[in-house]
Amino acid sequence: MSILKIARMGHPVLRVQAEAVEDPTEPEIRRLVGDMIETMLDANGRGLAANQVHVPKQVVVYIPPGDEDDDEEEGDGGAHEVAVLINPQLEPLTEELEDGWEGCLSVPDMRGIVPRATRVRLRATGLDGSAIDQELAGFHARVVQHECDHLKGILYPMRMHNLGSLMFESELQHYAAKADDDGKG
Ligand code: NI
C-alpha cells in the first residue's frame, strides 16, 4: 500500500462528478481502498473520498463514530474500523438541518460551520460487493454527507451559510473557547 498525494482546494479533480464503479470487487478498487485508508490515517483524517487522491471514482473511506462520540466530544475514532462505501447514494430523511464544525484534508488547517441534514438514508456497496442500507443520524450522518459531497465535486465551504465562521484551526483554538474537534474529512 502507498500513501497518496491529497488534492487541495483549487485542484480541478475536487470539482468533478466522480464516476460510478462498475465492479466494486475488482482488485484495482481493493488496492485503491487500501491506499486511501493508509493515506487517511497518515493524515489524521476522519474520512477520504477518492477524488481527494486524484481518482474520480465513487469510493469513500471513513471512520464511523462510535456510540461514545457525539457533537460535544472529541472523536478520535482510533478504536473503530474503517468503513468503505462504493457508489454511495444519500437520501435525506428530514428537512431538519443542524450546524456543526467541519474540516477537510483538502482544505488544510481550516474549519467552518456547516449545516447538514440530521438524518439520512445511506445506500452503497461494500468492498465485498455486499449491499449497505443504513439510516444514519447526527455526526455519523454529517461525516457521510461531507464525503459523499466530495464525489459530487462539492467542498464544505460551498455548503456554508455564513462564511464568517470559516477560520484557521489555530485561530479557532485561540478564540473559540468551546470548539468541537471531530476530525477532518
Ligand atoms: Ni473533505
Image (cartoon, helix red, strand yellow):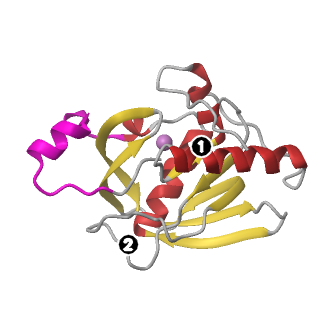
Is residue 165 visible in the rendered image? The answer is no
| SS assignment at label 1 | helix
Residue 140 got which mark?
none
Return the x and y of residue 39 as percentages of the image width and height: 59, 43
Pointer 1: what residue?
A: 39
CB of residue at label 2: within 8 Å of ligand 1? no
Other-residue count near label 1 (Cα within 10 Å), few / some / many at <14 / 14–19 / ≥20: many
Report the Cα–Cα distance between label 1 and label 2. Answer: 23 Å
Pointer 2: what residue?
A: 69
Dot 1 or dot 2: first in sequence order is 1
Amino acid on which the number 2 mark rests in the picture: Asp
Q: Is residue 171 magenta?
A: yes
Q: Nearer the viewer, mark 1 or mark 2?
A: 1
Seen at 75% across and 43% down, the residue is: 32
Image quarter hosting the N terminus: top right
Return the x and y of residue 55 as percentages of the image width and height: 71, 33
- Viewer-proximal residue among 134 and 179: 179
Residue 174's image quarter? top left
| SS assignment at label 2 | loop
Q: Which residues are magenta?
A: 160-181
Seen at 86% across and 43% down, the residue is: 28
Return the x and y of residue 164 as percentages of the image width and height: 19, 35
Q: Is residue 108 left or right of residue 161?
A: right
Task: Please count the marks in the image.
Answer: 2
Seen at 60% across and 38% down, the residue is: 152
Residue 13's image quarter? top right
Is residue 96 visible in the rendered image? The answer is yes
Amino acid on which the number 1 mark rests in the picture: Thr
Return the x and y of residue 23 as percentages of the image width and height: 89, 50
**11 lies above or below 42:** above
Q: Is residue 43 left or right of residue 180?
A: right
